[in-house]
Amino acid sequence: MHATKTGVLLMAHGTPASLDEMPAYLRLVRGGRPPSDDLIAEMRHNYAAIGGRSPLTDITRAQRDALQERLGPGIPVAAGMRNWTPFIGEAIEALVAAGARRLIGIPLAPQFSTLSVRKYVDAARAALPDGIRFDPVESFHLHPLLIDAFAERLCAAQPEPDERIVFTAHSLPVKVVESGDPYAEEIAATARAVAERAGVARFERAYQSAGRTPEPWIGPDLGTVIEQLSRGGARKVLVVPIGFVCDHTEILYDIDIQAARIAREAGTALRRTESLNTSPTFIRALEDIVRNML
């Protein structure tokens, strides 16, 4: 098959462009269920605290542009969002208009989960025109270049000998993991591989950004781990988010503001590694994934 016939679809969560769009955005995130006034107010507050909008869409477009540059003009690359514009369907339309008849779909979430990656893949399949082949990447949690990219960020932070390292990822409902979802195992595998690559012998693992639902979510929660480390005498914590590939509210608010406040109150200094964003090593990982599927 000619390379010109293949396009690459990068898929991400999506984010509203303004606080006014929050109710409509949250309705999409919640599968059509209207959000409560409290949830709208809380999310508006969180977004306002990081400047009024999340950089997720801008960074995803920058990742798309960087990957396009590496792949060359023969393989069109488009970025689509599951919960906001530009939607996954719009990105597929652009790729088909560019002549692509086979699409390689890459969810920008390295570890597979039925709640994230599966939903991206389902959204893409639902938007596929007739006669277009779709080959999704379901997980790249141990891709050597992804591990290199995270390890580079960790080494660049130059952890101090007395600084405790905590790898984090987005939490999931307990029932999802208990039903056989491999997400938690893949997060653990990524953490081990990054630690080994960066020469880190001791680390903790935590989850963050649990949903606001009555059901239990997997832990330990990042805030709880920070408090426990502080009680154990730790005065410095370095957070390494390995479940995310760019800056957005889960990084800029949940870690940089919320977790940092918990650390301060516990008498501990908290910082985190830089997100991958357009890390050349990460973009090379995406390129390698595509070329291996061509």
Image (tube, grey):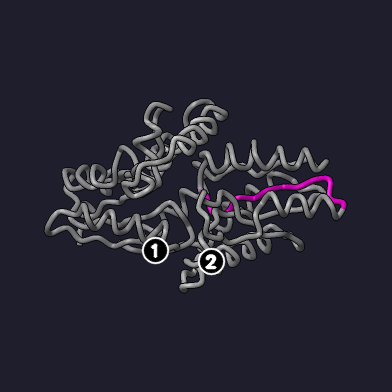
Tell me the kind of residue under disc 1: Glu
Q: Quadrant of the C terminus?
A: bottom left
- Label 2 CA crowd tier, 10 Å (few <14, some 14–19, many 20+): many
177 in magenta? no
Residue 5, horizontal then vertical, whole percent: 20, 54
Identify the mark at residue 186; answer none if there is no mark: 2
234 in magenta? yes
Residue 275, horizontal then vertical, whole percent: 57, 43
Q: In percent of the image, x 62 and y 64: which residue is there?
A: 193
Residue 98, horizontal then vertical, whole percent: 19, 44
Establish if 116 lies above or below 39. Answer: below
Establish if 25 lies above or below 232. Answer: above
| Cα separation between marks 2 and 1 | 12 Å
Identify the mark at residue 138; answer none if there is no mark: 1
Q: How many marks?
A: 2
Residue 12, horizontal then vertical, whole percent: 39, 47
Q: Quadrant of residue 49?
A: top right
Residue span colored magenta: 233-244
Q: Residue furthest right?
A: 233
Mark 2 in CB contact with mark 1 (< 8 angstroms)? no
- Label 1 CA crowd tier, 10 Å (few <14, some 14–19, many 20+): some
Tell me the kind of residue under disc 2: Glu
* Kind of element beneath mark 1: loop
Q: Nearer the viewer, residue 156 or 226?
A: 226
